[in-house]
Image (cartoon, rainbow, N blue to C red):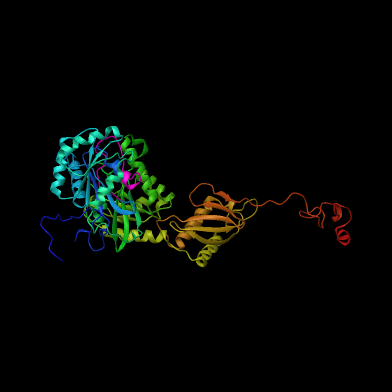
Amino acid sequence: MGRESRDAPTRRPLSGVAERRGGDAGPDRGVAPAPSVPVVAIVGRPNVGKSTLFNRLVGHRAAIVHDRPGVTRDQNIVAAEWQGRPFLCVDTGGVEADDRDTLGANVQRQSRLAVAGADVVILVFDGRAGLSPADQDAVGTLRRAGRPVIYAVNKIDTEKQAGLVYEFARLGVDPLVAVSAEHGRGMADLMSAVFERLPPSSAASVAPRVQRTRLALIGRPNVGKSSLLNRLAGVERAIVDAAPGTTRDPVDTEITLQGRPYVLVDTAGIRRRARVVDAVERLTVIRSLRTIERAEIILLVLDATEGMTDQDARLAANAWECGRAVGFIINKWDVISARAATEERWIETLHERFPAFAAIPALCVSAKTGWHVDRIAALVRGLEQAIDARLQTSRLNQVLRGAVGAQAPAAVAGRVPRLRYASQIASRPPTIAIFTTHPEGIKTSYVRYLQGRLAAAFQIRGCPLRVEFRHSRGTTVQGGQGGQAVCRGRPRPQRAEGRKVSGGRGKPGQGGGPKGRSRTGGSVRSARRRG
């Protein structure tokens, strides 16, 4: 390889996207290697419409948008596509962040990392507010960074406002594109200018993306979720601050644990609903709860100094009811260890207080020191095997017969439902269909009994095992999520009114005439002879 020119800018790694730095994450975990798709970073001073433009380019609401300045803090990296050409779009917290405090300095550092790792930078101006000294400083900073820059004048919603662009021509920059992120005006011109300035290697075709299991870090504010994300990724992917509520947008990071690819999602802390009064916090909580639905494995981070609270229990129950595998990460153990507490005793206390979570695996770690963080990979692998479990049909029916033999279902209208056959019909989570004579008569307590027997037999821990009861004639009863089971599907066909013309006196299904005579007169035998 030839030596690069000194004047050519050297691309620095983008935290969370580029290849893992040597020695930062250890041999078994770290950020996934850098993809060959181009990276486009959106920067600008606060409240100029960066997040709105980001949502417009990626095609959905991936970032929180609010009139309050400084809502975005961490880098928000989302894979996008424009006219069949893939790229990574990065939203940042603004280049004018107040660096007099620790949080402001961290936001500004994240913006500089995004610029350093981008192939093309989009600097956004506010066309309505006009040119400001902060905009001039941002232009000078990007010129020194040596990155290709597209200058977008935002909030040009109509043709009458097009003249607002000429004020920014004083900067002597090119290209200067008028856009309206809210209404989608000028997006074609903006992206054409972006892809014209991409290096040839970045514009090449890429291989199909590897399917990755999604892991979500959820919990109350200030329990150490972002610190744990940075420790697992091996880079400073998320801002860590002592003030609760630092994280707002969900932060997706592609990582590798023991050679297996995952997407680790850091979420904003979720407080009790009664305590959420701020509009921005309400938006962050909604997005965090939606992250549970998008993930396959939920890692609920607990504060070891406070124990498991009722809010933690509600979050765990919510994830369980959504059919997600759940694991408990007990963080801040470096503080607890000074009190001579043991891991076993802490977990036993948790199970004594919340016996419903006894089947959920728990692990004590310290994100600050890295103690036992390497064991998270084994815990995640166990949860992944649980949600992907394949239950052999013969073994499944053998366990079912043993469970019924030990305790039969309660009788319904004098008849005991017969559980004839069982088969697995889905995974993530594992779902079993049991065919029975009276699916509507299976009680919720018996459903839980079967779930416990089946989960213990197949060693499924940390993952809900769903059971559906089906009638041989097409009726289905959903079970396994609590509450009374509801019968679904086609109703059982009813017998036609009236009685058949057959022998017998007054018996169901036989002739209604006395002494077995037909309604037309004479016995059934004589009627057959006449026919």
Quadrant in the picture for residue 215: bottom left
Q: Is residue 151 left or right of residue 458?
A: left
**Residue at coordinates 51% horizontally, 57% vertically from top-left?**
450
Q: Position of residue 297 (x, y in %)?
A: 37, 54
Q: Position of residue 396 (x, y in %)?
A: 51, 64
In reply to whether residue 395 is colored magenta, the answer given is no
Q: Position of residue 157 (x, y in %)?
A: 30, 35
Quarter occupied by the N terminus: bottom left
Q: Is residue 60 visible?
A: yes
Q: Is residue 321 left or right of residue 527?
A: left
Q: Looking at the picture, tell me which residue is in the foreground, 254 or 466.
A: 254
In reply to whether residue 66 is colored magenta, the answer given is yes
Give the residues in magenta: 55-78
Quarter occupied by the C terminus: bottom right
Residue 456 versus residue 197 in the image, above or below:
below
Q: Is residue 478 left or right of residue 348?
A: right
Secondary structure mostly taken by the magenta-highlighted segment of the chain: loop
Q: Looking at the picture, tell me which residue is in the foreground, 346 or 103.
A: 103
Residue furthest bottom in the image: 394
Q: Looking at the picture, tell me which residue is in the foreground, 51 or 379.
A: 51
Residue 216 versus residue 96 in the image, above or below:
below
